Image: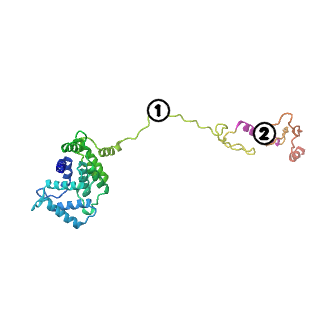
Amino acid sequence: DLDRAEEDSKVQRKLHLFRCQSIQVSIKRLWDMLPLDEDGELVMEGYVELNLRLQKCLSKDFVLEQAVDSAVGDWAEDVHEGQQSMTEEEFSMFLFELCSLWCSPGISLRAYLLFLNTAFIAITEARGAHTVGLRDLDAIEHLSKSFFDLVSLQSSARVEPGPEVAGGPNEALNAWYSANLTSDASQQAMLQVQRQVFQVTHDVRAVFLFRDHDGREQDEHDNLQLVRHASKTLSKVSRAQAPRDLPLAPRMPEPRRGIVGTTKEPAMIPWWPHTTGAREKGAPQAPEGRSQALANIATSAAQRRNLSAPGRPVARPAPQSSSLALLPQATGAGARPHSGARERQEPVPVGRAFETRRAQPKGR
């Protein structure tokens, strides 16, 4: 009796799961990809094409001849004798039974949704976020090990009945229903399955599997729509401008060139020897002490030129060297007297030509 009650409980759970809206939506996706006849039913060729693709993505050791024999045998079992086509309800029962075989021993909404939607993306061709039809058989690859691990993990998860529901099969069924088929549980299951399918397939279609059935409002934007909207309006954003009301920073005064002590760098004054003439126009001015020394040199040169003029008996000053002019004169007790301090004032020689002209007699 306990085994029969447990079997009846499993049947009840599968019936509730088969009538679930998210399960029907997942099955309907595959039905829309199949070639139908004039009556809107699936013929044997379309059934075999789908069966082969499911076998290749689920079976690691895929052999085409054996897969064709298996698909023809499944067709004979799923349709009545003499029937040439399959209705949508019969196709739904076939796909649901296949899902139950892979998701046993547990019965979980998340495991069934994960199996159906991962298989759908694996065997169909996409153009962006839109599905355009079945993928070529040669292009289909075997699903990764992570997919089968996720299905096994979801199917083995069971609901532990609490103290208030422990006691009978009806209470266990109510606990299973609350954990799988309530509104909140279904929404959480669909959102989780979308993330898991994307993790396995890396297909953008996984984000839109249950966009219209996951409980979100129609006017609620998802992350992809927000990114698209931001990309379109990014070019309209203007660059930030500097504030106009802030005062400008004062400019630092530039140091004058050629003035000693204004900067840390040495004064940029060229050296002018005393033997050169006047300095060039626009040359930088020398310091006060150096200017006085140069003036003394110029005065001494002028005096020497005056003394060399003929017929001008001018007292000759004491000769001074140019180097001594630049140095301070020694004064005090230790100063040595200059040898030429007292010099005789001699007349300027007039020359032989001048004396000859003066000695000639005047004309009559």
Measured Cα–Cα span from mark 1 to mark 2:
57 Å
User: How many marks are shown on the rendered structure?
Assistant: 2
Q: Which residues are magenta?
A: 287-309
The amino acid pointed to by label 2 is: Leu
The residue under label 2 is 327
Q: Position of residue 160 (x, y in %)?
A: 26, 44
Q: Categorize mark 2 by other alpha carbons within 10 Å: few (<14), some (14-19), many (20+).
A: few
As displayed, is residue 254 above or below residue 121?
A: above
| Nearer-the-camera pick, 302 or 25 | 25
Mark carried by residue 246: 1
Tell me which corner region of the image, top left, top right, bottom left or bottom right, holds residue 32.
bottom left
* 279 relative position to 313: left or right: left
* 99 relative position to 228: left or right: left
Q: Residue at the location (22% across, 62% down)?
A: 52
Tell me which corner region of the image, top left, top right, bottom left or bottom right, holds residue 313.
top right
Q: Position of residue 133 (x, y in %)?
A: 22, 57
| Nearer-the-camera pick, 259 or 248 | 248
